[in-house]
Amino acid sequence: MKTITVRYFAMFREHAGVSEETLTLNAATVKDVFECTRDRHGSTEPNGHCKVAINDHMADWDTAVSDGDIILLFPPVAGG
Amino acid sequence: MGILSCCFPQLRAVDVIEVTDSVIDTAALQRSLKNPAAGGYCAFEGWVRNENEGHVVERLEYEAYEPLVIVEGEKVLAEARALFPFLDARCVHRVGMLELGECAVWIGVASAHRDEAFKACRFIIDKIKVRLPIWKKEHYANGDSGWVNCERCAAHGIAE
């Protein structure tokens, strides 16, 4: 089990009802974390349209997570 | 202060992207790109529009994660510079609640010749819309609101 801090933005923050939470979960990759939080908060957004960062660095969905990581979950972006 | 530094006050070695919660001063930004080697300048302004996909839009709310907007934005500017060698580029993106007609994003590129400025400006706005952690929420006339997903419009080459 790993203790991971997850930060939510925009639509994800509204789904979660919080901007950040610390979770203890059995996750190998950031995709595992994404799916855990999606189930937890009842979101249906597929990860394919989203982006993720670990400790302020953009990451791929198969990047391994470590105890103490801060995961940033970004819903589909729309700048401009 | 020499004559050049007076007329061209903000020559920079690094292309800059910024996030602001204040009104974007496009005239000042244009002046900041002045360069004696520039034969032209191209800018793009993204404005808040009153309609989207059949909904009457009253205002737009922008949110950004600034640390990674800066990191990813600087990568986009570096990619643009490699593809279309220009003299100088700047980008400013607004956050917060914006009213109709307000400028949400400004991009300016100064170059020796016009081709690089036009192409770099288009490249930068297209990448900004799909790569930077920025989100916009439309507030509609009927009181509803909704987050915009720009992947579809980017796929169709629709410039918003």
Image (cartoon, grey):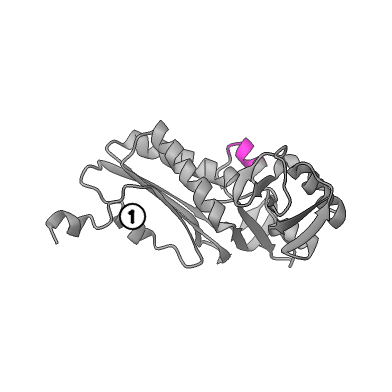
Residue A73 visible in the snapshot: yes
Picture layout, residue A33 above or below residue B60: above
Drawn side of residue A22 relative to residue B41, left or right: right
Residue in front for this viewpoint, B143 or A71: A71
Q: Residue at x 67, y 45 (%)?
A: A51
Give me the chain letter of mark 1.
B
Residue B111: quarter of image: top left
User: How many numbered markers are drawn?
Assistant: 1
| Magenta segment boundaries in residue numbering | B152-157
Position in image of residue B72 (x %, y %): 53, 46
Main SS of the magenta part reads helix
Task: Report which residue position mark 1 lands on.
Answer: B30
Residue B48 visible in the snapshot: no
Position in image of residue B80 (x %, y %): 43, 37
- Mark 1 Cα shell of 10 Å, populated few (<14), some (14-19), many (≥20): some
Tag 1: residue type?
Answer: Gln
> In the current view of this chain or complex, which residue is farthest to the left?
B2
Label 1: state its secondary structure: helix
Residue in front for this viewpoint, B55 or B14: B14
> In the current view of this chain or complex, which residue is farthest to the top?
B83
The quarter in which the N terminus of chain B is drawn is bottom left
Picture layout, residue B64 above or below residue A46: below
Residue B7: quarter of image: bottom left
Position in image of residue A27 (x %, y %): 81, 45
Drawn side of residue A79 relative to residue B145, left or right: left
Position in image of residue B5 (x %, y %): 19, 56
Q: Residue at x 71, y 54 (%)?
A: A68
Q: Residue at x 61, y 40 (%)?
A: B154
Q: Does B137 appear in magenta?
A: no
